[in-house]
Image: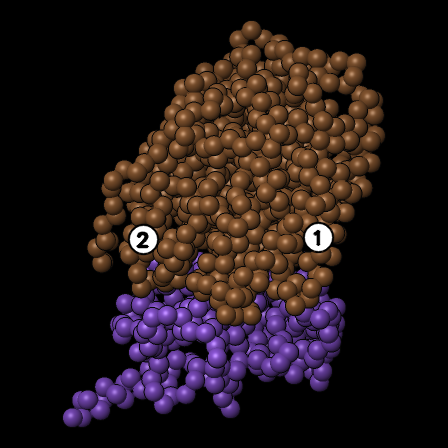
Chain colours: A purple, B brown
């Protein structure tokens, strides 16, 4: 039998909050682990009443959803936390935002509603905006066209087990080129498959199909995540929780 | 423009390297003050990777103390890994601070904290990346004054070509004195140039300026004399000592990194100095006397620090934390204060004779019950008398068994190998001890899944200790003894599988020995090693023993000395040691007598509880032991 710590078990989770946050500026260089540590410490500084796991090594109940890669900024990262005391989601959002470094912003916090399903099931696609300094629109446009025209573009991806060939094309459901200040901008919608296709992989694919070699490192920002519907739009993953709340209110109003 | 940010030039490089987060700054509680608002600019360097350097308490203290002054600005810089260093050279980006991303060359002072001598090559790399001349004599008044501090600064002779000054002892007050001198010199229009500034600094208590002292050597290679070359500098340089730690409650707002670091916790120094008299321990010798922070002083630092950081663990640091006069009450009252908050307390390592289960239970009451660490240091009772860390085998086994019986599953034991007078048998007794600990522990706890990790380091004799005269054991001796020990522990697999062994081979210790007890002639070896690509010598994947031994052989040959001469050679009583003109307060005669007593296996008691044994520190430095108990207690915190 596994040993149990003495004393009563930790208080149970009474409320789950779902949070959308952004990593910007210099902190785009933070890895997922770096951000996780930072968020956990900020939750403590903000005195958010976290629920903890039982056992000799209690951990706060936090689950992270697919994190943006190190080096990429994001306006749409998601996590879910379990609380031992019910709190006003907006108060938690504000307190956590204040406790975090300037370049991490807490954008949204909603209560998870029973029966609306898991957050992970509501995310299968990322919307990316990639700035390519030193590249012109005239260079990027034909490269994107050539990429979209291909059925498959194999690129070498660095993984834990060395280089691995993956297809960068299949996951990209749409892509377009635009003009920025001193750079061209690549907009794309990318489905989250396994292995993941990241902005770097698409850039490697552009080099492969169109010999596009940006003179400077690209700056990628994940603008949104969610479920891709048939019309090609990406739905807000916190939408069902919000809708449930509104319905809940309407029920009250009806009574 | 001076003090301009380099970040726009650095950013494109960060996308191409490993762990870029360590270079971006912006950590919680980091500060970036306006450049023009400060009269004196300090760059503070820890000469190792960010993950090792960031938690360093000394640097964090000085960073706050300096930044609290309206006329000073301090920023941090760390050793840059080779991947970024190569890109920086390619793109002309100099060594930068992580706070304001300013060029290190723009600062008035570069303070470098040497916790270990293995950071020396990283200083050279940083100077070169900064565009600052490697040799102090080649710098002009536009270059930063390079100041060495930390424990290794008690013998800065091996790096005396590269540093302008070394500071002995506690840094809190002396950095202010140095700031005043630099500010006045700048405001007067830099009279007399760099030499005048250095001569003024040489008159600040605790500051040593090597260029004003000439070293001559005798025909046998030993030092004949160290003489000052100016009348206005002191013949001997005494260390600085901060009295009343409660007046210096730093760091108040510790920097919390985003990147992973070696210590993921907040630390509060509960006392400074140690008089246990362990003869191998340089820290215990050079930081005397014992000065305790009071229970209430500690309580408010813990409270403020946790609020400022969000850490879930508080380390109560010192050289022997369980010796604090109020430790039992402190642990209990802190545990009461943080009941239900998943905040755990930890001590770095515990003396076997100061440990008790009540204390350990209080420490882990609100958080994780991580492992316990004891440091018997020597394998046999005989060798423990030699090093003056006396504890009987029975006491040791009993203490560790008690820990297992009270629910701890993992106990770590620290030892050293290569101690003076040590034989194979002394080291093999480590195995007997570990085996007994496991047997007794299994019985006491009724569990088979307990573990004991034996961690062994090669002993390196250090300046300002009774072992400063000792012959260092060769790498072969260390490796041989560790091999025997490993065999013996693995003889009985039923027990041996519960014992983990962590050790390093003896080679890095030999180089550390060269750098610890070296003199000015060793500077050429360091420079040669760096020129051949040596850096990050504390990391086994970067350390090259062959590069060091080749450089040592060739660079030291013209002087008629060699690597063995500096390491495995025993010194005689009246030999002039390279650090004799640097005063830690300890009488050289006291140290010699203590060395002789070590050879006779005689112990000395702790002056914290027994009468003064005349080590010399208090009368020489005008200091005294400051200990409790204060009779005060920690009241519960008001719930916010």
Q: Which mark is residue B485?
A: 1
**Disc number at residue B505?**
none
* Residue at x-position 37% and y-position 70%: A6
Residue at image coords 56%, 58%: B437
Residue ranking furthest to the left: A255
Quadrant in which the C terminus of chain A is drawn: bottom left
Subunit bearing disc 2 = B
User: Looking at this view, is A197 or B292 the one in front?
Assistant: B292
Q: Is residue A9 above or below residue B597?
A: below
CA–CA distance in space, label 2 to label 1: 39 Å
Q: Chain of mark 1?
A: B
Picture disc at residue B332 = 2
Q: Earlier in the sequence, mark 2 or mark 1?
A: 2
Quarter assignment of residue A57: bottom left
Percent x, y of residue B169: 49, 28
Circle 2 or circle 1, nearest the eye: 1
Q: Is residue B495 above or below residue A83?
A: above
Residue at 65%, 68% in the rendered image: B494
In the image shown, does B310 or B110 lie closer to the viewer?
Answer: B310
Instruction: Relative to B268, say whether B226 is above or below.
Output: above
Are marks 2 and 1 in one subunit?
yes
Q: Secondary structure at mark 2?
A: helix
Structural crowding at the residue carrying mark 1, measured as other residues with C-alpha within 10 Å and reported as few (<14), some (14–19) or many (≥20):
many
One can see residue A28 in this view = no
Please state which of residues B353 and B278 is positioned toward the viewer in this rendering.
B353
- Residue B2, position as x, y percentages in the image: 53, 34
């Amino acid at each position: 039998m596994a040993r149990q710590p003495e004393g009563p078990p930790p208080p149970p989770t009474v409320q789950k909050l779902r949070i959308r946050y952004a990593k910007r500026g210099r902190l785009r260089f933070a890895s997922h682990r770096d951000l996780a540590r930072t968020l956990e410490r900020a939750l403590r500084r903000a005195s958010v009443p976290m629920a903890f796991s039982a056992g000799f090594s209690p951990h706060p109940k936090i689950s992270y959803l697919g994190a943006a890669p190190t080096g990429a900024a994001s306006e749409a990262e998601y996590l879910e936390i379990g609380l031992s005391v019910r709190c006003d989601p907006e108060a938690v959002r504000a307190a956590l935002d204040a406790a975090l470094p300037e370049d991490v912003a807490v954008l949204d916090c909603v209560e998870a509603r029973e029966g609306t399903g898991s957050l992970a099931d509501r995310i299968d696609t990322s919307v990316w905006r990639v700035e390519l300094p030193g590249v012109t629109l005239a260079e990027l446009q034909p490269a994107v066209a050539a990429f979209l025209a291909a059925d498959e573009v194999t690129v070498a991806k660095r993984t834990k087990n060395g280089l691995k060939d993956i297809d960068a094309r299949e996951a990209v459901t749409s892509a377009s080129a635009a003009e920025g200040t001193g750079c061209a901008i690549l907009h794309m919608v990318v489905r989250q498959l396994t292995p993941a296709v990241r902005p770097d992989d698409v850039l490697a694919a552009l080099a492969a199909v169109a010999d596009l070699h940006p003179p400077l490192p690209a700056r990628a920002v994940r603008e949104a995540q969610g479920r891709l519907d048939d019309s090609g739009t990406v739905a807000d993953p916190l939408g069902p929780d919000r809708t449930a709340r509104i319905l809940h209110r309407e029920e009250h109003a009806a009574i | 423009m001076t003090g301009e940010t380099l970040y726009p030039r650095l950013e494109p490089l960060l996308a191409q390297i490993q762990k870029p987060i360590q270079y971006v700054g912006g950590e919680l509680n980091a500060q970036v003050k306006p450049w023009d608002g400060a009269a004196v600019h300090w760059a503070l360097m820890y000469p190792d990777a960010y993950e090792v350097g960031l938690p360093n308490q000394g640097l964090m203290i000085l960073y706050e103390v300096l930044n609290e002054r309206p006329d000073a600005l301090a920023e941090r810089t760390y050793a840059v890994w080779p991947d970024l260093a190569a890109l920086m050279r390619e793109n002309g980006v100099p060594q930068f601070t992580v706070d304001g991303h300013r060029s290190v060359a723009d600062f008035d002072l570069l303070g470098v904290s040497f916790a270990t001598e293995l950071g020396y090559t990283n200083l050279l790399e940083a100077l070169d990346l900064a565009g600052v001349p490697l040799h102090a004599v080649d710098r002009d008044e536009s270059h930063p004054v390079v100041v060495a501090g930390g424990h290794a600064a008690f013998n800065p002779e091996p790096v005396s070509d590269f540093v302008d000054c070394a500071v002995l002892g506690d840094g809190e007050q002396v950095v202010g004195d140095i700031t005043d001198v630099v500010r006045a010199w700048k405001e007067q229009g830099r009279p007399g140039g760099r030499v005048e500034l250095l001569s003024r600094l040489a008159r600040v208590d605790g500051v040593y300026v090597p260029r004003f002292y000439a070293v001559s050597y005798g025909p046998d290679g030993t030092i004949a004399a160290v003489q000052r070359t100016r009348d206005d500098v002191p013949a001997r340089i005494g260390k600085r000592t901060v009295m009343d730690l409660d007046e210096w409650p730093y760091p108040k707002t510790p920097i919390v990194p985003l990147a992973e670091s070696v210590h993921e916790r907040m630390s509060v120094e509960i006392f400074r100095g140690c008089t246990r008299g362990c003869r191998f321990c340089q820290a215990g010798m050079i930081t005397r006397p014992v000065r305790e922070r009071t229970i209430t002083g500690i309580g408010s630092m813990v409270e403020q620090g946790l609020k400022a950081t969000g850490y879930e663990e508080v380390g109560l640091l010192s050289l022997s934390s369980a010796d604090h006069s109020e430790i039992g009450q402190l642990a209990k009252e802190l545990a009461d204060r943080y009941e239900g908050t998943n905040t755990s307390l930890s001590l770095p390592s515990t003396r076997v004779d100061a440990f008790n289960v009540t204390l350990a239970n209080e420490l882990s009451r609100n958080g994780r019950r991580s492992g316990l660490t004891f440091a018997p240091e020597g394998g046999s009772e005989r060798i423990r008398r030699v090093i003056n860390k006396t504890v009987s085998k029975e006491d040791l086994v009993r203490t560790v068994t008690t820990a297992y019986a009270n629910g701890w599953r993992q106990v770590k034991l620290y030892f050293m190998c290569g101690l003076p007078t040590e034989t194979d048998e002394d080291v093999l007794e480590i195995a007997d001890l570990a085996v007994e600990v496991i047997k007794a522990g299994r019985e006491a706890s009724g569990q088979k899944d307990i573990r004991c990790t034996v961690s062994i380091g090669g002993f390196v004799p250090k300046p300002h200790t009774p072992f400063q005269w000792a012959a260092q054991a060769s790498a072969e001796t260390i490796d041989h003894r560790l091999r025997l020990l490993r065999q013996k522990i693995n003889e009985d697999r039923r027990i041996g599988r519960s014992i983990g062994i962590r050790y390093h081979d003896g080679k890095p210790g030999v180089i550390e020995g060269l750098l610890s007890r070296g003199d000015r002639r060793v500077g050429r070896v360091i420079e040669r090693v760096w020129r051949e690509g040596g850096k990050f010598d504390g990391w086994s994947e970067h350390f090259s023993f062959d590069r060091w031994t080749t450089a040592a052989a060739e660079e030291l040959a013209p002087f008629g000395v060699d690597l063995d001469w500096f390491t495995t050679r025993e010194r005689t009583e009246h030999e002039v040691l390279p650090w004799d003109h640097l005063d830690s307060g300890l009488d050289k005669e006291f140290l010699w007598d203590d060395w002789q007593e070590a050879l006779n296996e005689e112990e000395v008691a702790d002056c914290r509880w027994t009468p003064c044994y005349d080590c010399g520190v208090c009368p020489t430095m005008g200091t005294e032991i400051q200990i409790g108990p204060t009779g005060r207690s920690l009241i519960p915190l008001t719930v916010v």
